[in-house]
Image (cartoon, helix red, strand yellow):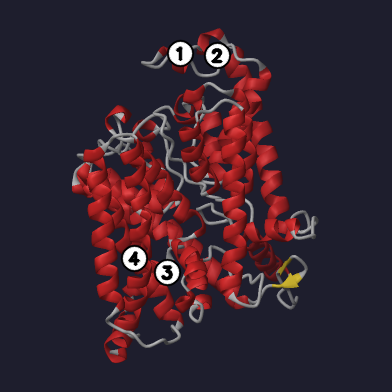
Amino acid sequence: MRLRLVAHTVGLLVRAFGVSLLVPMVVDWGYGNWQESIGFLIAAVAAIALGEYARRGHSRGSDLLRMEGIAVVASVWLVVSFFAAIPYAWSGLSIIDSLFESMSGLTTTGATIFTDFSRYSEGIYLWRSMTQWFGGMGVIALFIAVLPKLAIAGRQLFFAEAPGPEEDRLTPRIRHTAIALWGLYVGLTALQVGVLYVVGMPLFDAVCNSLTTLAAGGFSPHPQSIGGYANPAAEWVFIGFIFLAGANYSLQYRALRGRPLALVRDQEFRTYAVIVVVATLLLTYVLLPFNRDPSQEYLTADTSLRVLVDAPPMTVLRQAAFQVLTIITTAGFATDDFNLWNDQARMILFGLMFLGGSAGSAAGGPKIVRAILVGKYAAAELLRVLHPQAVTTVRYNGKVVPNKILRAIVTFLLLYLAVFAVSTGLLAFFGADLITSMTASIATLGNIGPGYSIVGPMGSYASFPVISKIVLFLNMWIGRLEVITVLVFLHPAVWRSARMGD
């Protein structure tokens, strides 16, 4: 592995990322937040300067090998998180808290350290949303589209960032593919901004919330998330766009390009839609009796957060649909404090945390396609036990899935569960109760955001000790990069090749 070439490519990306920091700086100027804007200026200058320095370390154009592409992706998320954290630190957060908030944004997790939302400027809230917007389609995919020098290495980089089991090419060149998907991403974001503004949401909030919706992120400038706006029409808008955020963007692109059946013909999309509908109806079913039983009435410390008590059935259905979608797509928004729902409702949402959205979407988590293939693989193995001489194959969308892909998916899921178990154990060891440990672990590893107990949708991760925040920081990084992309660097062979490459 050629470390200088990796550093050169990372430098290009960091330099371009630094330019984006000027946008919230200008916004703070516009709102008169001169002091707060300095943090963005410092971060922008530092990122551009270091990026240019790293870029000059290797000036010859060269194609990246697969491992080098993976190294670029893994490195960029870490390096960029440090620069993205500078504005938070300038606003008064500690270094660890700033890095946590930064990584949560870039990985579209939506877990937050913020407790007092009144102390931060408009630029900070826009920056939180922007980091999730960049992370939604992948920082790498974004810059492949705008930096022609990376076009040659695009396939390797896209492979390392793409959340599906294999690369899905829309056009012959990855640069054109990135541009096509980015155009769809921008278009849907702009459309949501317009629709939210029409239904009564303030323009600034509509922009911030739309940036994080299409990214399946979950950061909102309102301390009570989407529920704080008390706008049912806006909630239905979010339901529609969150559903799109969890669907495969390449299939959506094909549907818009004259192949309207591309989505419904895809097995993963059909499964995704069925899960959403069934889980919504099931959640509504378990909430309605709870809603009607006066003995179950309760209030939080804030009396405006009366949870589904005396609500009409359509309101319960809307709440159920919203929370099912925001959990399965890892969007992380909330219209209600589901942390206070009954155990049956919370168990449904907890199960959805282990699924994730569609491959090729902005969602985090293991992805539905992997669940489908593992289920088929398990069924094939059971059949083989019953009939040892039988020839079994696993098919997906009518095509035979190679054994190497099935092995990779099983390996991924085993590693995913192993990371979940280890991080849960560490959080419990460092003082968190079991419910908090489990849900905080899966909420960060799956890039979901809220969990239960102190990390519920109206809660915060601020009370965790420093060591636990570091564990959760790593969880978000590992989960967003599909686990193996990070864990592969624990293998000694990678570092031996790195020494030989230079």
Identify which residue is drawn at 20% across, 48% down.
95
Cα gap from disc 1 to disc 2, whole angstroms: 8 Å
- Residue type, mark 2 in image: Val
The reply to whether callout 1 and callout 2 are in contact (CB within 8 Å) is: yes
Q: Where, by quadrant of the figure, is residue 314 drawn?
A: top right
User: What amino acid does circle 1 point to?
Assistant: Tyr
Q: Is residue 140 left or right of residue 51?
A: right
Label 2, label 3: how many angstroms apart (C-alpha)? 45 Å
- Residue annotated with mark 4: 14
For label 3, the residue is: 485
- Of callouts 1 and 4, which one flags the residue occurring earlier in the amino acid sequence? 4
Which badge, 4 or 3, comes first in the chain's sequence? 4
Q: CA distance from mark 2 to mark 4?
A: 49 Å
Marks 2 and 3, the one that precedes in the sequence: 2
Please name the residue that numbered disc 2 is placed on.
Answer: 309
Label 3 and label 1: CA atoms lie apart by 45 Å
Which residue is tagged 1? 298
Tag 4 near tag 3, CB within 8 Å: no
Label 1 and label 4: CA atoms lie apart by 49 Å
Q: Residue furthest top?
A: 294
- The percent coordinates of residue 341 (x first, y second) are 50, 25
